[in-house]
Amino acid sequence: MESGDETVSGSLKKIIWLILMAEFVIIHATVLIKLFLYDYYLSVFILVLGSLIMAAVQYLSYRFFVKSCALNVSRFTDEELEIITSEVFRETKCNKEKVRVYENSKTVTPFVMGVFKQSIILPRECRRLPNLKLILLHECFHVKRRDTLYKYFMMIANCFLWFHPLAYMVRYLSYQDIEISCDEAVVKGKSKEERLQYGEFLIASARNMKEGSEVFNAYWNSSKSILKHRIEAVIDENRKWDTFAKAAIVVMVAVSVVFCVLLSKDLQEDYAKVTAPPNEYAGVVAPPLYTDEAIQQMLLLEPMEQEGYHYYFFSKYDAKYPPKEFEEIEAEALNPWQMKIKSPGHFRDAADVAIQRLYYYLENQTAFDSDAYEQSIQNRSYELVYSTLLAGDIDNSVWGYIWKVYCSDVSTSESLQNGYAFVKEGEDNWLYYTTAVQIRMTEPYLFEVVGFADLYDVKEAYEQKYETEILSYIPRIITAKASSETMTVLDSQKQLADAFAAENGISDVRISFPDNALEGYLLGIIDRAALQVMCVLYRTEDGGHTWKPVKMDTVGAEHSVTYDFAFLSREEGYMAIHSFFDQEPELLRTEDGGMTWTKVQFSEEITDFCQAFCPVYYNGEYVVYVGKEGSGKEEGEKACYESADGGKTWIYTGQITFD
């Protein structure tokens, strides 16, 4: 059939019904998954059970149809009929070797059986009809297009959607249009008389359909209504109702597509919510975190001498609390801030776990799993730098921790952004934490966190309250106060500085950007002589893209070795140098952006400490560390100096040791 502007061909509608049924299946599958995810198991059970029952009925019905058909079939043996079938196979390009043609004494309509091995079944009276070739053409088009497989899909989808009235309608219409599509192929290009002749055969088939008799027709197209529409399609080339059908189908498809997209997106969100790891911190009141309240609670316990926690200290508790396995412990931890401990005498284990859980709380709460800690108490997510018992005993204690966590991109750290962590100089990928944690035993083998605070704030509070320096043994950590964003920018600035230095013959390049990512300084060596170098200083105001020379005086430009270089502001800068002629710390300072330099004064010289480094910002003050000759900036013993006059003079305050 040639379709006019106002018609929709059976082939096109067959595709549309297939798409529409597939969309119905996707929508129902989506709803079914949502019901399952939200634990509506009874609804899921009813829907699935209905599908299985309908599938079983369809299967049994089809098996009965096949069995009945097999009892009444026989091969075509007539030579004249063989010639006609050969012509039909050649015209439709079907493989004759793979398709068998049978006649049946009880069927009233021709049909195709099978999917991979297909057979054409014809009514016995067909051999006497003059339009047998047209009939065979119709069935061969079914074979060529594998319409049986199409019908199987529609039947299975209808079973899946057994409750859906539109599914039955789509299945019915698809069966109708799959026949009309083949009829269109058969009568395409045929005369009006040939169309009428083919239609008369269809009318005769409809007349022969008798309800309740032994005569049966094809399992797939047993409706007189379908035959009626087929007859109309064969005889009338311009079916006006197709215009409205086309509009209705387009609207249905558009609505279904939109609905499918929205449901699928919603399903992804629901699936992510349902399958997301549980957040054991949610709904649990956290202990005081870096607050004055936490510090005041800790101050109720008297501070302890260094190495207060040792074997003799905790071994006295072992007899009272012998080691147990977790399943033997009656106490239960109700939230992440409570910890079961196998050996309460070693109560530092509880503090270790508390620190680990603090990290999860600050960085990624859903990554925490309390069961993992019952499997391995030493499953550490951090690297311990230093820990000590500050105050108390097994019943109530305060612990001091310095710990770090590797982070490939510190700019993503919540702890760094919120001020709970910092980056140590020279270790750009490590987040450092200085934490004091208070824990207490609420019942045997069960501890809970009382509060967290900054280690150095707690140290200062203890020293003020008890007027003692008993906690002076706690080591200091030099912090890099630049933000993660600034450090990332410095990488590009370093590249620009290196490129500029290479073009101008400058070696031993050092850069410093004190206030922002645009204004900074570059120091390097332009010439060397015996025991002396000639330095040059440049300034940039555009992040290192262009550099302008700063004319330094002789003090800043000529010396033996430059160990360190830093500007603390746009005007104030420092240069730590070393002279082979003096065995004393030498630190140069400028107040005018590097043009003039003066040597700073140290209140006293400590024996063997002769190598100064530029000031660092620590605990609200600028500190200068002076090490022994040849020592690195963050290693070995250091003498500490602090300034009360803005960096002009430095007063000795003690010594520390870098690990």
Image (spheres, rainbow, N blue to C red):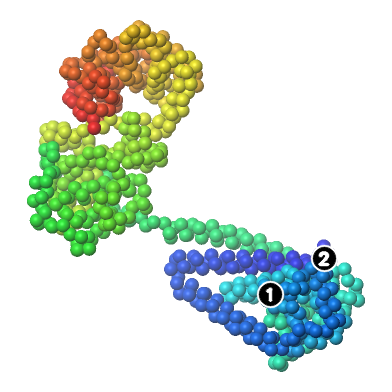
The image position of residue 143, as x and y in percent, is 73, 72
Q: Up-down: is 260 above or below 288?
A: below
**Taking 292 as reference, is 560 left or right?**
right
Secondary structure under tag 2 reads loop
What is the CA distance from the residue labelled 1 to the residue labelled 2?
A: 33 Å
The image position of residue 249, as x and y in percent, is 70, 66
Residue 336 is at least partly visible in this image: yes
Identify the residue shown where x is 83% and y is 69%.
91
- The residue singled out by tag 1 in the image is 117
Identify the residue shown where x is 80% and y is 72%.
89
User: 251 and 278: which one is in front?
Assistant: 278
The kind of residue tagged 1 is Lys
The image position of residue 283, as x and y in percent, is 32, 56
Label 1 environment density (alpha carbons within 10 Å; few <14, some 14–19, many ≥20): few
The disc at residue 3 is: 2
The kind of residue tagged 2 is Ser
Q: Up-down: is 474 above or below 227?
A: above
Quadrant into which the C terminus falls: top left
- Which residue reaches farthest bottom? 213
**Taking 534 as reference, is 389 left or right?**
left
Secondary structure under tag 1 reads loop
Quadrant into which the N terminus falls: bottom right
Q: Earlier in the sequence, mark 1 or mark 2?
A: 2
